[in-house]
Amino acid sequence: MEKILKDAKEWMKSYMKSFYEDDETVMLGIRTKEIHTWYVTAYARDLAQHLGLAVHDVQLAELMGLFHDVGRFKQWQVYRTFSDAESEDHASISTSVIVTLPVWASLSDEDRDLMLFAINNHNKKDVAPAPSERHLGFAKILRDADKLDIYRVLEPYLDDAYGKGFAKQFIDVTDKESFAPGFLEKFVRAEQVDYNEIKTQNDRKLVRLMWVYDINYAWTMIRLKEKGYIEKIIASLPSNEQTELGFTRLRKHVDDKCLENDKGF
């Protein structure tokens, strides 16, 4: 697996560079996903090590992180958007690329199945029923690693000044004060929402906060808290009776999660 991982990283470097263009706006999207790829790769490895997984499984988790968004580059090139709703499901594009690679033939049937399941489920609202504890475990690692870095990627777009050009992939500045009907109520109840319900900038910010309820491991939550991502989002939102109820509930969840004992699989 060590050689497979090394070869995969070299291939990925070349693949990402193949999408380079002279247009700086285009390159902003490419560089964003390029940097994101390496962060998620490292986070998946570190989280797997933290869980005490075998060396092979740590490397497999790292490989999943490396390839989880490989479809994003084609998506950006073809559609000039990272919105799956306006293009294609990027996890599906990723798996369609992965199965054509030379490295794919070097993996065992079990590793292939685990990788496809984790990558296909890394961006979904909920994880599909898992065939085994190992399938679910790898999916949780990848989802946590991805979210941990997405908070970093999206942090600059809390500022309304970024509401132009590429930033429109992440933020809607048409309404800076209100929330879509029922959206705030769901946040207070700690319920996940359908992304199609998002109507305002504040809705998008609440969705980021609600991701916190989908964090699987204390390891991830501790890092989210240490980096201050959660509090920065809270500080950017209006303060009223409902939002404060939601913030209080969320902070308690974060603190409780940080105290849990993570277990491997």
Image: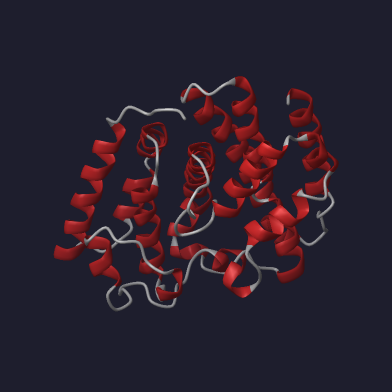
- How did the renderer colour the structure? secondary structure
Residue 17 located left or right of residue 264: right
Residue 52 position within the rendered picture, expressed as x and y whole percent measured from the top left = 49, 21
Q: Answer yes or no: is residue 240 visible.
A: no
Which quadrant: the N terminus?
top right
Q: Position of residue 254 (x, y in %)?
A: 28, 41
At 64% across and 40% down in the image, what residue appears? Answer: 64
Q: Nearer the viewer, residue 172 or 13?
A: 13
Decide if residue 46 is on the left or right side of residue 238.
right
Q: Residue at x 62, y 40 (%)?
A: 65
Residue 132 visible in this rendered orientation of the protein: yes
Quadrant of res 178: bottom left
Relative height, residue 182 to residue 50 (above, below): below
Residue at left offset 85%, top offset 51%:
18
Task: Check the image and report above or below for 20 versus 241.
Answer: above
What residue do we see at 70% from left, 53% from top?
A: 95
Residue 225 location, quadrant:
top left
Placement of 63 over or under 190, stated as above or below: above
Please give left or right for residue 49 compared with residue 180 in the image: right
Q: Is residue 49 above or below residue 183?
A: above
Marker count (numbered): 0
Q: Position of residue 215 (x, y in %)?
A: 39, 44
Residue in the foreground of this view, choosing between 23 and 35: 35
Residue 81: image location, x then y, percent: 65, 68
